[in-house]
Image: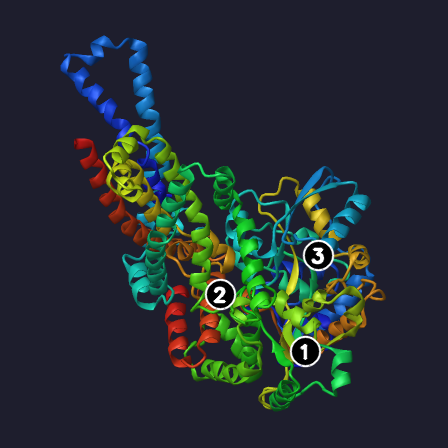
């Protein structure tokens, strides 16, 4: 889906910079094409054309079709002739008479804030600790990373065992009767705990990979200059890690916006767990096929994520100009 | 609506008027069998008479077209999970393979997932035969050309005229073969009630009194769960049918009555008065968990489909009994219930049409019922020739109980548009359970959304 597009833009970033330089150099020496053999030229053309077509076909076409369909009413059954044009009625309905919409937007924002405030710093912190090569570091590394590897169905089941009101672990131990998944004052937070549990390991792994790549001589230099551990992290290592920081930032945005699975496993994103993504799915994928209405929701989601994509691109481009 | 004379007759009441008007082909088939054409409600009684004749008349007019069925039939089942319904299905498949020599390739998917994906499933590579439901939900897809015409299979020996009507699409052709149905009733544990001296209530006031009694005895009166979204629809349906009657239910589901009308508000108001006797925190609970509280004698009764008894351990199922939801308005009475029909359809484009039709015909036969009987708990068989001797008393009682009803509804999500049921009614009923005090606001929102969907 179109939401995935930011992912596709992550890898280039800095890795691309050297190529760009080489290209610029190549440009200076008059005609590049003259120096490329016929075979090279075909290879280059294919390497550019095939991914471009794939992106157009798999990302842009469905994205644009979603926007187009958002102005229609369609059951998703039968040919194009069964599509009825209704202008902006879907949008009007979403903003005026669709009760789950407002909570969904709120929940996505809460999701974003929580992901920023808890798993991201925590993941960074764990990565820094593990980078010290503590005793049993590998064990902890695996332990923190396992949640990401587990299949979603299993994660949902595990947390169901913990949160179930009548038969769950928490209520059994504490003797409480909190309805963790049903009471909408707590269920979002209960699910967020499970999400943070997954997200922390992810951030940790990314950051750990980045830390391993930091030149140890930088830290040595810092400590020789008398910097404390904290100072050397925040003043030296953290700035050097800028590319990784940007990636973690972007991943947090993306994860918050496309949050879906865990909520879907719990209760299909209803009753206090509404998210924009579950509303889209509920309207399009279920037995109900309100393709037009669901597309309008997806378009709104696309618009929101575009804001972040633009922000990211600006940062990334500035980086490249330097 | 007149009281039906037989099970076949009451089932006929399921059929929406649009279908009843268009049974040309069925009439033709009936005519061919010498039982006379049946086109309208008054003629139904004669159809019941004719039904007897059909069942004694041997093989009926069924059977596919030309060659003998052979090869492999793919079978999409909505039962997975190793419980009773799956055991029944496995027994069915085994028995069919043995008797026909065909191979059945089963693709089982979890019940809810199957339903949620039905739209894509039918437009994609649907299995030759798949489980589905009778009534509006079948017609909706049949009208759109996604379900195969199985008129060839009909009439089926022992399957009543009314079941046939419920299997008929709006064009008068059959798209469905019934297997079983079950009533929505109040389920309770007999021995526990005898021990405590409780008796089944017949009016709402008695039910409230009994509930208060149970509460003072430290028991939760009515087990309740709505995490899955559909169980609450049952409660809405029955209150609506008790307060406003069956005809209002039909019109409301068809989008012809307003959801913000005084009638609907009254349903929610009555429900709100009953909520204190329901198990609290229903939105975090699966129906299975609610049924477990009944098994453990923590709850006194549970209004659910009769399948609730499957949650009882096998040796305790004889102890389960039920009664119909009590009367609320004496002018309306208590002779309407939800009793959904389950069964099977053929895909619009089957790989093995002969085999699919042969399998469908077998599914509704007494032999299939016998095979499934052995494997575990059946519900109530659609085929009147099925041997009932192996059934538990509660099922025989349920069969008679259904036959005694004046009107039968399918269920909220089977009687109305699927998109309305899932995107509007599930969240709305959950919203009501969470915040039962704002009925005016809630019903207004439902009506606004209904208008946007029923266009």
Quadrant that contains the C terminus of chain A: top left
- Chain letter for the residue marked with disc 1 in the picture: B
Q: Are marks 2 and 1 in contact (CB under 8 Å)?
A: no
| Side of B252 relative to A96 (left or right) | right
Which residue is at 33% across, 16% downward? A43
Establish if A306 lies above or below B16: above
> In the figure, residue A192 lies in which quadrant?
bottom left
Q: Which mark is residue B83?
A: 3
Image coords of residue A218 (percent x, y): 27, 31
Establish if B319 lies above or below A37: below
Label 2 Cα crowd, 10 Å radius (few <14 / some 14-19 / many 20+): many
Label 1 Cα crowd, 10 Å radius (few <14 / some 14-19 / many 20+): some
Image coords of residue A289 (percent x, y): 45, 55
> In the figure, residue B71 lies in which quadrant?
top right
Cα–Cα span, label 2 and label 3 = 27 Å
Q: Which residue in the structure is indicated by mark 1?
A: B405
Image coords of residue B324 (percent x, y): 67, 80
Image coords of residue B157 (percent x, y): 77, 59
Q: Are marks 3 and 1 on the same chain?
A: yes
Quadrant that contains the N terminus of chain A: top left
Residue B48 visible: yes
Q: Which residue in the structure is indicated by mark 2?
A: B421
């Amino acid at each position: 889906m179109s939401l995935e597009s930011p992912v596709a833009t992550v890898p280039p970033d800095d890795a691309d910079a050297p190529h760009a330089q080489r290209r610029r150099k190549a440009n200076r020496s008059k005609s590049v094409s003259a120096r490329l053999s016929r075979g090279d030229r075909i290879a280059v053309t294919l390497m550019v054309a095939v991914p471009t077509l794939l992106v157009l076909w798999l990302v842009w076409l469905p994205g644009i079709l979603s926007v187009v369909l958002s102005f229609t009413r369609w059951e998703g059954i039968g040919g194009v002739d069964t599509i009825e044009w209704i202008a902006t009625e879907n949008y009007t309905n979403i903003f005026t008479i669709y009760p789950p919409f407002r909570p969904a937007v709120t929940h996505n924002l809460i999701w974003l804030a929580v992901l920023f405030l808890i798993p991201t710093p925590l993941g960074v912190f764990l990565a820094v600790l593990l980078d010290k090569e503590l005793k049993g570091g590998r064990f902890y590394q695996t332990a923190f990373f396992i949640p990401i590897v587990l299949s979603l169905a299993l994660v949902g089941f595990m947390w169901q065992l913990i949160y179930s009101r009548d038969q769950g672990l928490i209520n059994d131990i504490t003797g409480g009767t909190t309805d963790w998944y049903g009471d909408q004052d707590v269920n979002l937070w209960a699910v967020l705990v499970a999400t943070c549990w997954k997200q922390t390991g992810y951030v940790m792994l990314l950051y750990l990979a980045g830390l391993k790549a930091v030149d140890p001589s930088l830290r040595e230099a810092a400590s020789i200059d008398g910097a404390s551990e904290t100072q050397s992290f925040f003043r030296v290592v953290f700035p050097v890690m800028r590319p990784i920081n940007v990636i973690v930032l972007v991943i947090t945005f993306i994860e918050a916006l496309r949050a879906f699975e865990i909520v879907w496993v719990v209760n299909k994103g209803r009753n206090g767990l509404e998210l924009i993504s579950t509303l889209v799915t509920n309207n399009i994928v279920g037995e109900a096929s309100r393709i037009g209405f669901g597309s309008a929701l997806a378009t709104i989601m696309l618009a929101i994520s575009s804001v972040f994509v633009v922000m990211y691109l600006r940062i990334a481009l500035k980086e490249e100009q330097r | 609506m007149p009281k039906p004379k037989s099970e076949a007759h009451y089932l006929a009441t399921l059929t929406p008027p649009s279908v009843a008007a268009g049974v040309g082909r069925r009439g033709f088939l009936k005519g061919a069998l010498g039982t006379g054409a049946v086109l309208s409600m008054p003629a139904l009684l004669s159809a019941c008479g004719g039904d007897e004749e059909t069942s004694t008349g041997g093989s009926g007019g069924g059977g596919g077209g030309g060659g003998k069925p052979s090869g492999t039939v793919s079978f999409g089942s909505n039962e997975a999970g190793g419980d009773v319904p799956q055991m029944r299905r496995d027994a069915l498949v085994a028995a069919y393979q043995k008797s026909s020599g065909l191979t059945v390739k089963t693709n089982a998917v979890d019940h809810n997932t199957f339903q949620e994906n039905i739209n894509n499933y039918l437009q994609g590579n649907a299995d030759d035969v798949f489980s589905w439901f009778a009534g509006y939900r079948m017609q909706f897809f049949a009208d759109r050309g996604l379900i195969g015409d199985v008129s060839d299979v009909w009439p089926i020996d022992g399957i009543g005229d009314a079941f046939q009507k419920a299997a008929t699409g709006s064009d008068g052709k059959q798209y469905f073969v019934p297997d079983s149905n079950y009533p929505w009733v109040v389920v309770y544990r007999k021995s526990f009630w005898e021990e405590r001296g409780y008796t089944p209530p017949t009016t709402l006031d008695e039910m409230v009194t009994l509930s208060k009694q149970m509460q003072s005895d430290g028991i939760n009166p009515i087990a309740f769960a709505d995490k899955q979204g559909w169980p609450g629809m049952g409660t809405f349906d029955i209150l609506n049918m008790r307060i406003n009657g069956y005809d209002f239910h039909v019109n409301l589901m068809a989008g012809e009555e307003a959801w913000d009308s005084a009638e609907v508000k009254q349903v929610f108001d009555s429900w709100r008065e009953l909520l204190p006797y329901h198990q609290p925190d229903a939105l975090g609970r699966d129906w299975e968990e609610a049924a477990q509280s009944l098994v453990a004698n923590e709850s006194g009764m549970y209004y659910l489909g009769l399948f609730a008894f499957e949650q009882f351990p096998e040796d305790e199922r004889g102890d389960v009994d039920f009664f119909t939801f009590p009367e609320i308005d004496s002018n309306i009475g208590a002779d309407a219930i939800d009793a959904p029909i389950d069964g099977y359809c053929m895909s619009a484009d089957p790989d093995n049409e002969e085999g699919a039709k042969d399998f469908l015909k077998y599914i509704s036969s007494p032999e299939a019922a016998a095979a499934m009987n052995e494997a575990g708990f059946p519900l109530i068989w659609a085929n009147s020739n099925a041997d009932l001797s192996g059934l538990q008393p509660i099922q025989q009682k349920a069969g008679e109980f259904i036959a005694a009803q004046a009107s039968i509804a399918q269920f909220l999500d089977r009687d109305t548009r699927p998109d309305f049921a899932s995107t509007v009614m599930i969240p709305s009923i959950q919203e009501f359970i969470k915040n039962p005090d704002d009925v005016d606001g809630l019903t207004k929102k439902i009506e606004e959304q209904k208008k946007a969907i029923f266009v």
